[in-house]
Amino acid sequence: MLFLVGAGPVRGFAITLGIGIVTSVFTAVYVTRLITETWYRWRKPATVVV
């Protein structure tokens, strides 16, 4: 909405905010997966409880 309605600095802020959100989601998923894979390799659980 900020990008569509705003002008000038507001559009720049909207772009920066969008890039931040995308980066945050990507990092959260990647780091969580990395930690999980490392834990599985380290502990080698016989069963996975869901």
Image: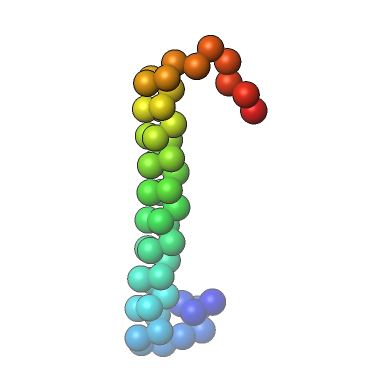
Quarter of the rendering occupied by the C terminus: top right
Q: Is residue 24 above or below residue 38?
A: below
At x 42%, y 66%, the residue is: 18
Residue 14, compared with residue 6, is above or below; it is above
Instruction: Locate residue 22: give its quadrant.
Output: bottom left
Q: Is residue 34 found left or right of 6 in the rendered image?
A: left
Q: Give the residue furthest to the right.
A: 50
Q: For the image shown, how many numbered marks are present on the structure?
A: 0
Q: How is the image coloured?
A: rainbow
Task: Locate the N terminus by quadrant.
Answer: bottom right
Q: Residue at x 41, y 70 (%)?
A: 17
- The x and y percentages for residue 28 are 43, 48
Quarter assignment of residue 49:
top right
Q: Percent from the top left, x then y, of residue 27? A: 38, 49
Q: Where residue 34 appears, x then y in whole percent?
A: 37, 34
Q: Residue furthest top?
A: 46
Which residue is drawn at the image coordinates 38% and 20% (left, top)? Answer: 41
Q: Position of residue 12 (x, y in %)?
A: 35, 78
The residue sitting at 38% across, 42% down in the picture is: 31
Q: Nearer the viewer, residue 40 or 18?
A: 40
Quick check: 46 above or below 26?
above
